Image (cartoon, rainbow, N blue to C red):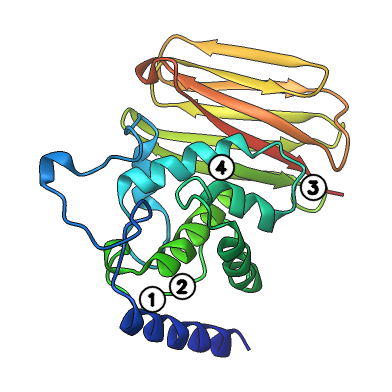
Amino acid sequence: MQDRFYALLRHRLREEIERRPPLYPWETEVREYEDALAPELATATVWASQMQALNLPVPMPEGVLNRLLEQCQSLLQSSLQEGRKLVQAVEALFPGESDALNHLAGYVMAAPARSGTSAPVLEGVLDHYDAATQPQQMLLSLVAAREILNTLVLTVSPSQPTLEREWHTTAGLLTLRAMLLESGSLRLVANLPCAGRLKLQSSEVEKTAHRANAGPVSLELLEVEALQSYSVQVELEQAGTSSLSFAIALGE
Protein backbone atom coordinates (compact mmCIF):
# COMPACT_ATOMS: atom_id res chain seq x y z
CA MET A 1 0.00 0.00 0.00
CA GLN A 2 2.84 2.40 0.90
CA ASP A 3 4.67 1.67 -2.41
CA ARG A 4 1.47 2.36 -4.37
CA PHE A 5 1.02 5.68 -2.53
CA TYR A 6 4.53 6.78 -3.50
CA ALA A 7 4.09 5.61 -7.11
CA LEU A 8 0.84 7.57 -7.54
CA LEU A 9 2.36 10.66 -5.99
CA ARG A 10 5.43 10.48 -8.25
CA HIS A 11 3.22 10.12 -11.31
CA ARG A 12 1.18 13.16 -10.35
CA LEU A 13 4.28 15.25 -9.76
CA ARG A 14 5.83 14.28 -13.10
CA GLU A 15 2.66 15.47 -14.83
CA GLU A 16 2.87 18.74 -12.89
CA ILE A 17 6.49 19.26 -13.99
CA GLU A 18 5.49 18.94 -17.64
CA ARG A 19 2.57 21.37 -17.31
CA ARG A 20 4.18 24.20 -15.34
CA PRO A 21 7.66 25.73 -15.21
CA PRO A 22 9.36 25.79 -11.79
CA LEU A 23 8.86 28.84 -9.58
CA TYR A 24 10.33 29.98 -6.29
CA PRO A 25 7.78 30.31 -3.44
CA TRP A 26 7.83 34.11 -3.71
CA GLU A 27 7.22 34.16 -7.48
CA THR A 28 3.99 34.28 -9.46
CA GLU A 29 5.83 33.98 -12.78
CA VAL A 30 9.23 32.86 -14.02
CA ARG A 31 11.88 35.45 -13.20
CA GLU A 32 15.66 35.72 -13.32
CA TYR A 33 17.79 37.06 -10.49
CA GLU A 34 21.31 38.40 -10.43
CA ASP A 35 23.34 36.51 -7.86
CA ALA A 36 23.83 39.60 -5.73
CA LEU A 37 20.09 40.30 -5.68
CA ALA A 38 18.75 36.79 -5.08
CA PRO A 39 16.25 36.99 -2.20
CA GLU A 40 17.24 35.50 1.13
CA LEU A 41 14.40 34.00 3.16
CA ALA A 42 16.20 33.75 6.49
CA THR A 43 19.52 34.50 8.10
CA ALA A 44 21.68 31.47 8.91
CA THR A 45 22.20 30.86 12.64
CA VAL A 46 24.38 28.66 14.79
CA TRP A 47 21.56 26.09 14.63
CA ALA A 48 21.39 25.89 10.83
CA SER A 49 23.92 23.06 10.38
CA GLN A 50 21.30 20.48 11.38
CA MET A 51 19.03 21.52 8.53
CA GLN A 52 21.46 20.07 6.00
CA ALA A 53 21.51 16.78 7.93
CA LEU A 54 17.74 16.25 7.66
CA ASN A 55 16.60 13.18 5.77
CA LEU A 56 14.73 14.93 2.94
CA PRO A 57 13.71 13.62 -0.51
CA VAL A 58 15.79 16.26 -2.36
CA PRO A 59 18.16 19.08 -1.31
CA MET A 60 16.45 22.30 -0.21
CA PRO A 61 17.79 25.88 0.04
CA GLU A 62 19.26 26.86 3.39
CA GLY A 63 17.07 29.96 3.61
CA VAL A 64 13.87 27.94 3.19
CA LEU A 65 14.92 25.40 5.82
CA ASN A 66 15.92 28.10 8.29
CA ARG A 67 12.55 29.80 7.88
CA LEU A 68 10.79 26.46 8.44
CA LEU A 69 12.87 25.88 11.56
CA GLU A 70 11.79 29.23 12.96
CA GLN A 71 8.13 28.54 12.21
CA CYS A 72 8.21 24.99 13.60
CA GLN A 73 9.74 26.16 16.88
CA SER A 74 6.94 28.69 17.31
CA LEU A 75 4.35 25.89 16.95
CA LEU A 76 5.80 23.38 19.41
CA GLN A 77 3.37 24.19 22.21
CA SER A 78 0.39 24.70 19.91
CA SER A 79 -2.69 22.53 20.50
CA LEU A 80 -3.32 22.26 16.74
CA GLN A 81 -3.46 18.86 15.06
CA GLU A 82 -0.30 17.84 13.21
CA GLY A 83 -1.65 18.54 9.74
CA ARG A 84 -2.68 22.08 10.66
CA LYS A 85 0.71 22.68 12.28
CA LEU A 86 2.41 21.71 9.03
CA VAL A 87 0.28 24.16 7.06
CA GLN A 88 0.97 26.99 9.51
CA ALA A 89 4.71 26.28 9.40
CA VAL A 90 4.76 26.50 5.61
CA GLU A 91 2.15 29.09 4.67
CA ALA A 92 4.46 32.07 5.30
CA LEU A 93 6.48 30.84 2.31
CA PHE A 94 3.37 30.62 0.12
CA PRO A 95 1.04 33.54 0.93
CA GLY A 96 -2.55 33.02 -0.15
CA GLU A 97 -2.12 29.29 -0.76
CA SER A 98 -3.76 27.91 2.39
CA ASP A 99 -6.29 25.78 0.48
CA ALA A 100 -3.60 24.17 -1.67
CA LEU A 101 -1.39 23.59 1.36
CA ASN A 102 -4.23 21.94 3.29
CA HIS A 103 -4.86 19.65 0.33
CA LEU A 104 -1.18 18.70 -0.01
CA ALA A 105 -0.84 18.23 3.75
CA GLY A 106 -3.26 15.34 3.37
CA TYR A 107 -0.74 13.56 1.13
CA VAL A 108 2.06 14.15 3.62
CA MET A 109 -0.03 12.95 6.56
CA ALA A 110 -1.00 9.80 4.65
CA ALA A 111 2.64 8.73 4.52
CA PRO A 112 3.99 6.80 7.54
CA ALA A 113 5.34 9.08 10.27
CA ARG A 114 8.78 8.04 11.42
CA SER A 115 10.47 10.15 14.07
CA GLY A 116 13.71 11.58 12.75
CA THR A 117 13.05 10.46 9.17
CA SER A 118 10.99 11.60 6.24
CA ALA A 119 8.99 9.57 3.75
CA PRO A 120 10.85 9.65 0.38
CA VAL A 121 7.76 10.80 -1.51
CA LEU A 122 9.68 12.71 -4.16
CA GLU A 123 12.82 10.62 -4.64
CA GLY A 124 13.46 9.94 -8.29
CA VAL A 125 11.21 12.82 -9.40
CA LEU A 126 13.35 15.90 -8.74
CA ASP A 127 17.03 16.61 -8.24
CA HIS A 128 16.60 19.80 -6.22
CA TYR A 129 13.96 22.06 -4.73
CA ASP A 130 14.78 24.81 -7.24
CA ALA A 131 13.74 22.53 -10.11
CA ALA A 132 10.25 22.06 -8.66
CA THR A 133 7.01 23.78 -9.58
CA GLN A 134 5.25 25.75 -6.86
CA PRO A 135 2.91 22.87 -5.87
CA GLN A 136 5.94 20.59 -5.63
CA GLN A 137 7.79 23.15 -3.53
CA MET A 138 4.76 23.30 -1.25
CA LEU A 139 4.83 19.53 -0.87
CA LEU A 140 8.58 19.48 -0.24
CA SER A 141 8.22 22.23 2.36
CA LEU A 142 5.45 20.31 4.15
CA VAL A 143 7.61 17.17 4.21
CA ALA A 144 10.52 19.20 5.59
CA ALA A 145 8.31 20.82 8.24
CA ARG A 146 7.13 17.40 9.38
CA GLU A 147 10.72 16.21 9.60
CA ILE A 148 11.73 19.26 11.64
CA LEU A 149 8.79 18.93 14.03
CA ASN A 150 9.51 15.23 14.53
CA THR A 151 13.08 16.12 15.43
CA LEU A 152 12.11 18.89 17.86
CA VAL A 153 9.53 16.82 19.78
CA LEU A 154 10.69 14.05 22.13
CA THR A 155 7.88 11.80 23.35
CA VAL A 156 8.63 9.68 26.40
CA SER A 157 6.32 7.27 28.21
CA PRO A 158 6.52 4.36 30.65
CA SER A 159 7.02 2.02 27.66
CA GLN A 160 9.72 4.28 26.15
CA PRO A 161 11.16 6.18 29.11
CA THR A 162 14.32 7.50 27.42
CA LEU A 163 14.75 9.34 24.15
CA GLU A 164 17.71 11.26 22.75
CA ARG A 165 18.20 13.80 19.98
CA GLU A 166 21.37 15.03 18.32
CA TRP A 167 21.57 18.50 16.80
CA HIS A 168 24.50 19.70 14.72
CA THR A 169 25.55 23.30 15.39
CA THR A 170 28.39 25.46 14.15
CA ALA A 171 29.87 25.12 17.67
CA GLY A 172 29.74 21.32 17.61
CA LEU A 173 27.28 18.54 18.38
CA LEU A 174 24.47 19.15 20.88
CA THR A 175 22.80 16.10 22.42
CA LEU A 176 19.57 16.21 24.40
CA ARG A 177 18.26 13.25 26.41
CA ALA A 178 14.85 13.11 28.07
CA MET A 179 14.21 10.49 30.75
CA LEU A 180 10.92 9.65 32.45
CA LEU A 181 11.93 8.18 35.80
CA GLU A 182 10.06 5.53 37.77
CA SER A 183 9.60 8.09 40.53
CA GLY A 184 7.41 10.13 38.16
CA SER A 185 10.01 12.81 37.53
CA LEU A 186 11.26 14.09 34.19
CA ARG A 187 15.03 14.45 33.87
CA LEU A 188 16.65 16.32 31.03
CA VAL A 189 20.36 16.07 30.21
CA ALA A 190 22.00 18.20 27.53
CA ASN A 191 25.59 17.82 26.39
CA LEU A 192 26.52 21.32 25.25
CA PRO A 193 29.24 21.94 22.63
CA CYS A 194 30.24 25.20 24.37
CA ALA A 195 29.16 27.42 27.25
CA GLY A 196 25.42 27.75 27.43
CA ARG A 197 22.14 27.41 29.27
CA LEU A 198 19.34 24.83 29.49
CA LYS A 199 15.77 25.77 30.39
CA LEU A 200 12.91 23.40 31.20
CA GLN A 201 9.47 24.91 31.66
CA SER A 202 5.96 23.79 32.53
CA SER A 203 2.86 25.92 32.93
CA GLU A 204 3.79 26.47 36.59
CA VAL A 205 7.55 26.01 36.95
CA GLU A 206 10.67 27.12 35.10
CA LYS A 207 14.10 25.66 35.84
CA THR A 208 17.41 26.82 34.42
CA ALA A 209 20.93 25.41 34.50
CA HIS A 210 24.06 27.11 33.17
CA ARG A 211 27.46 25.77 32.16
CA ALA A 212 30.56 27.91 31.59
CA ASN A 213 32.16 25.50 29.11
CA ALA A 214 31.39 22.47 26.96
CA GLY A 215 29.90 19.45 28.71
CA PRO A 216 26.75 18.04 30.32
CA VAL A 217 24.08 20.00 32.15
CA SER A 218 20.88 18.58 33.64
CA LEU A 219 17.50 19.56 35.06
CA GLU A 220 14.65 17.65 36.69
CA LEU A 221 10.93 18.28 37.14
CA LEU A 222 9.15 16.37 39.89
CA GLU A 223 5.77 14.67 39.57
CA VAL A 224 5.12 15.36 35.91
CA GLU A 225 1.76 14.42 34.39
CA ALA A 226 0.96 12.18 31.43
CA LEU A 227 -0.32 13.81 28.24
CA GLN A 228 1.40 17.08 29.13
CA SER A 229 4.00 18.92 27.05
CA TYR A 230 7.01 20.70 28.49
CA SER A 231 9.03 23.42 26.82
CA VAL A 232 12.82 23.17 26.52
CA GLN A 233 15.20 25.88 25.38
CA VAL A 234 18.90 25.52 24.69
CA GLU A 235 21.03 28.65 24.56
CA LEU A 236 24.67 28.72 23.47
CA GLU A 237 27.03 31.63 24.00
CA GLN A 238 28.06 31.43 20.36
CA ALA A 239 24.41 31.83 19.33
CA GLY A 240 23.99 35.22 20.98
CA THR A 241 20.32 35.82 21.75
CA SER A 242 19.17 32.95 19.49
CA SER A 243 17.91 29.80 21.22
CA LEU A 244 16.75 26.39 20.05
CA SER A 245 13.40 25.11 21.32
CA PHE A 246 12.27 21.54 21.88
CA ALA A 247 9.12 20.01 23.35
CA ILE A 248 9.03 17.03 25.69
CA ALA A 249 5.69 15.24 25.36
CA LEU A 250 4.62 12.70 27.97
CA GLY A 251 2.71 9.71 26.67
CA GLU A 252 0.56 7.31 28.66
In the displayed structure, does residue 230 sit left or right of residue 69?
right
Which one is earlier in the sequence, the residue at label 4 or at label 2?
4
Amino acid beneath label 2 = Pro
Is 198 in front, or is 63? 63
Q: CA distance from mark 1 to mark 3?
A: 34 Å
Q: Label 2 vs label 1: CA separation?
A: 5 Å
As drawn, 1 above or below 96: below
N-terminal of the two: label 3 or label 4? Answer: 4
Above or below, comparing residue 33 to residue 223 in the picture: below
Tell me the number on the disc at residue 123: 1
Which residue sits at x=52%, y=59%?
Answer: 142
Percent position of residue 92, x then y: 50, 45
Residue 240, how many percent across, how many down? 39, 15
Which residue has dot 3 on it? 157
Residue 250 to residue 136: above or below: above
Residue of label 2:
120
